[in-house]
Amino acid sequence: MANKAQESSQLEPAFPFLTVLVSGGHTMLLNSTSLTEHRTLAETQDIAIGDFLDKATRAILPPERLRPPFGKALEEFAFCSQIRKVDETMTENIDIEKGSEYPLSEEVIQPSEPDYSDYSPPSRRQDELESRSTQWGWALTPPLAESKGGDKSSRRMVYSFAGLLTSIERLVKRPDPLFSLRERQDLAREVQRVAFQHLASRILLYLESSSTFTGDTVVVSGGVASNSFLRHVLRSTLDARGYQHIKLCFPPIELCTDNALMIAWAAIEMHRAGYTSSLDIGPIRKWSMDRNAADGGILGPAGWIKSNGNGEEN
């Protein structure tokens, strides 16, 4: 019978690997070397990517298409081929003002197989920082591309989405009230492209600069990991920059947003590793995964009980 060490060595993904946690409350890149050992490489300096996508969705989508989960609604709207057909038959643009009507029935806007063929990944760092012009006359500036300090500042290992959100809100609220479905859809696509390439950029910066990372996998989890376009952007970008050997690992889409399952799975893994907790511990709203953080990381809070493997507590 295989022992626990042998079983552990056969698990995929195997440590060490990079962790990308993307949700409504988190945007983090970590170097994970064991179940309890993680080093924070980059995190958001303002809002989380999931929060950003939710707010962008509310700004961009027609009222009748707004329904939770908003991130899924944005993805479906952005890559719905029927929208372009509907928009091309219209003789007038659509008024963005509150109360205006949109000729979109449930039958017309049904989820369709997404087409990512028009996506071109950045082949150079310089390409990541460039704004792409659109037929509508606007362009979204990638986060931190114009930070004070030039190239050095743009390479800071942080994420930022607040500025991009402000740009979107200003664009939607511009004086010209005409905003066609086609333009809304293009904006929905561009919002995701810019945000997801920003996520990929910090992975690339770390891989390019690190001489100590020996892993070959990036694990992406959290609610935003359910976005199929994110998966496409990350894979395409890594391939375009010479990292074809780096594997991407995602949970099944239907499990990415299941918080109860995430908590239960974490508990199972900790229990298997010999960690339990005393019954007098209280809930903690938030604490770091990094042991070098002020709170000591995962094992920082009081109340953990570690077994020595023989059923005895250390």
Image (cartoon, helix red, strand yellow):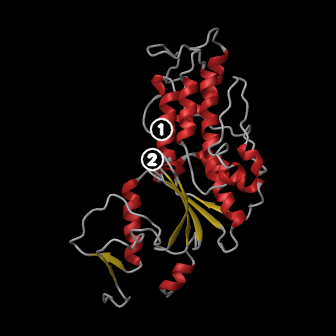
* Residue at x 62%, y 46% (from the top left corner): 196
Tell me if label 2 and label 1 are in contact, CB under 8 Å. Answer: yes
In this view of the protein, can residue 148 be seen by the observer? yes
Q: Position of residue 5 (x, y in %)?
A: 51, 85
> For the residue marked with disc 2, what is the amino acid?
Gly
> For the residue marked with disc 1, what is the amino acid?
Asp
Between the residue at mark 2 and the residue at mark 1, the CA separation in whole angstroms equals 8 Å
172, 120: nearer the viewer: 172
Q: Position of residue 132 (x, y in %)?
A: 73, 35
Label 1 sits on residue: 54
Label 2 sits on residue: 24
Q: Which image quarter: residue 145?
A: top right
In the shown orientation, is residue 211 left or right of residue 99? right
Q: Residue furthest front?
A: 149
Q: Which of marks 2 and 1 is nearer the N terminus?
A: 2
Q: Position of residue 213 (x, y in %)?
A: 65, 72
* Residue at x 73%, y 30% (from the top left corner): 133
Q: How many other residues sit within 10 Å of disc 1, few (<14), some (14-19) or many (≥20)? A: some
Q: Where is residue 60 in the image (x, y as percent from the top left)?
A: 53, 28
- Mark linked to residue 110: none
* Residue at x 57%, y 70% (from the top left corner): 12
Vertical comparison of 298 with 262: above or below: below
In the shown orientation, is residue 176 left or right of residue 300? right
Q: What element carries label 2?
A: loop
In the shown orientation, is residue 159 left or right of residue 155? left
